[in-house]
Amino acid sequence: MDILSIQQQAEKEIKGANDLKELNLVFEKYLGRKGEISKFFRSLKDLPLEQRKIQGKKANQVKEVLEKKIQEKRTILSKKPFQEIKRAELDVTQPGERINLGHLSILTYAKREVIDFFKSIGFEIIESPEVETEYYNFDALNIPDYHPARDSMDTFWLKNKEKSKDKFLLRTHTSPSQIRYMEKHKPPFRVITPGRVFRYEAIDASHEAQFYQVEGLAVSKDIGLANLRYVLENFLKYFFGREVNLRWRPGYFPFVEPGLEVDIECQVCQGKGCPTCKYAGFIELAGAGMVHPNVLKNGGINPYKWQGFAFGLGLDRLVMMRHNINDIRLFHSGDLRFMSQF
Ligand code: FA5
């Protein structure tokens, strides 16, 4: 077919297109990759150079004209009023199309529940930086450079852009918020810091390299381990909606004295032992204790006048236990089959 016949035929079909679907078919037929115009260009390769130039120029002009006409027709068709849609096209008895709405992660919902509980018993909710300095993450918390406790928190160190005496890192726990808060506030006070923490460690069913903690700190005059226990037990009762079996055992953290670890009975296996709890029947949920006098001092608080308790709860593990999730890696898997259950 010569180029003028192609043009005439295409223009007729553009005019005759009744809706956008038909118009798209016309577009494909003439201007698509395998359309008539492309075919025409390919057929020119055997012509003498002069002829090729003339025909090629013509074909380019036709291509432009057709593109313009299709665009104009598209504008007209997309404004076609609703009333003009043929009755037969519209079946009002058809069920509607389901729209899948996204929602927040279960970890975010859980974080909000934790905040609601602690707010209701008079705790203030604070934030603290995820990029920390060595001073706040370790030194001020009574963990000097040589201290073996640093090994329990493998650290992502950051490269300093400028020369500075502070070494930067991704916080390995939410405890630096204790010092930052104490520096700026006078006791008595009680606060929680929910937030993300990072550890350069091997991941498995109950360990992630990035997870959430909720730090708690309450400083006053008459405050002790009994208060800590009362607060944590009531929180867990609220969070689980029932009593859960806990195990309180001595634990060592340089920033508390005495220190405790709180374990919860593994809800995946009901304490029988499974890969999630590494066959222990219990899983570690929190570190806690009475704030070490050196830490109060580093925060500018007189340890002879004031005392307080602190805890650091693992939020991911808390959610795992409530919903029988057997692997912490599912939270960041991006698997919609997992996410949409909550
Ligand atoms: C700490 O991080 C202390 N800062 C907690 C603390 C605060 C103690 C205040 C005393 C006073 P630990 O490393 O044990 O401690 O972590 C606390 C909790 O975070 C654990 O009990 C656990 O629930 C959770 N956790 C720790 N490591 C991981 C991990 N890799 N993946 C998921 N959760 C973790």
Image (spheres, rainbow, N blue to C red):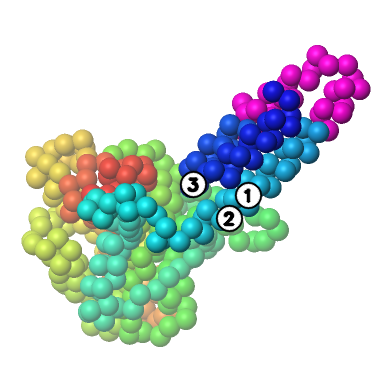
Question: Overall secondary structure of the magenta stretch?
Answer: helix
Residue type at numbered disc 3 = Asn
Image location of residue 11, percent across then percent down? 64, 40
Mark 2 touches mark 1? (CB < 8 Å): yes
**Residue located at (62% from left, 28% from top):** 35
User: Element at badge 1?
Assistant: helix
Image location of residue 208, percent across then percent down? 36, 45
Q: For the residue carrying disc 3, how many other residues have a C-alpha within 10 Å: few (<14), some (14-19), or many (20+)? A: few
Magenta range: 31-57
In the picture, the disc for residue 75 is 2
Whether residue 307 is visible, yes or no, is no
In the picture, the disc for residue 71 is 1
- Tell whether 213 sits left or right of 55: left
User: Element at badge 2?
Assistant: helix
Whether residue 8 is visible, yes or no, is yes
Image location of residue 14, percent across then percent down? 59, 42
Image location of residue 331, percent across then percent down? 33, 47
- Tell whether 217 sits left or right of 64: left
Mark 1 touches mark 3? (CB < 8 Å): no
User: Element at badge 3?
Assistant: loop
Residue 214, above or below 160:
below
In front: mark 2 or mark 3? 3
Camera-side residue of 40 and 138: 40
